[in-house]
């Protein structure tokens, strides 16, 4: 058994949730916040059999897309002023960051 943790941008979350339901794949959604842009994300926790991992990964890949976004970095606190960029920059956001973990035991009460 595997646990798939997929961190996706909030814009992609409804599409992924809908596609998981269509395929009969159960997931738990958790609100999360990214560390770089401090923007909203959704983390999906998906428990699945080993043979379904590729199917789930393909669903995540087709449901979540990367996009470019112009952001203005937040002013740093403390002594990090030498690395602060005071103008907007283009960064890639979206897509999905996925972790696949082995599960030693699963119990449902």
Image (spheres, helix red, strand yellow):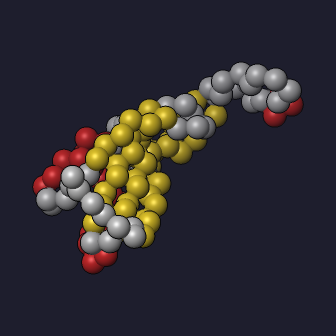
Q: Residue at x 47, y 54 (%)?
A: 97
Q: How many marks?
A: 0
Q: Is 32 above or below relative to 52?
A: above
Residue 90 visible within the image: no
Residue 88 visible within the image: yes
When asked about the image quadrant of residue 83, the answer is top right
- Residue 52 coordinates in the image, percent (x, y): 26, 72
Taking 83 as reference, is 40 left or right? Answer: left
- Residue 79 coordinates in the image, percent (x, y): 86, 27
- Residue 8 coordinates in the image, percent (x, y): 40, 46
Q: Residue at x 19, y 59 (%)?
A: 25
Q: Nearer the viewer, residue 6 or 59?
A: 6
Q: Residue at x 15, y 60 (%)?
A: 23
Q: Nearer the viewer, residue 85 or 38?
A: 38
Q: Is 88 above or below relative to 24?
A: above
Q: Residue at x 46, y 61 (%)?
A: 99
Taking 9 as reference, is 81 left or right? Answer: right
- Residue 98 coordinates in the image, percent (x, y): 44, 58
Picture quarter with the N terminus? bottom left
Find the residue positioned furthest to the front. Answer: 109
Taking 26 as reference, is 87 left or right? Answer: right
């Amino acid at each position: 058994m595997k646990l798939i943790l997929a961190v996706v941008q909030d814009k992609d979350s409804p599409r992924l949730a809908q596609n998981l339901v269509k395929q009969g794949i159960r997931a738990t959604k958790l609100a999360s916040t990214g560390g770089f842009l401090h923007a909203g994300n959704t983390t999906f926790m998906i428990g699945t059999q080993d043979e379904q991992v590729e199917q789930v990964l393909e669903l995540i890949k087709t449901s979540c897309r990367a996009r470019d976004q112009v952001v203005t970095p937040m002013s740093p606190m403390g002594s990090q002023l030498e690395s602060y960029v005071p103008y907007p920059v283009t960064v890639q956001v979206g897509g999905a960051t996925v972790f696949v973990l082995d599960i030693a035991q699963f119990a449902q009460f």
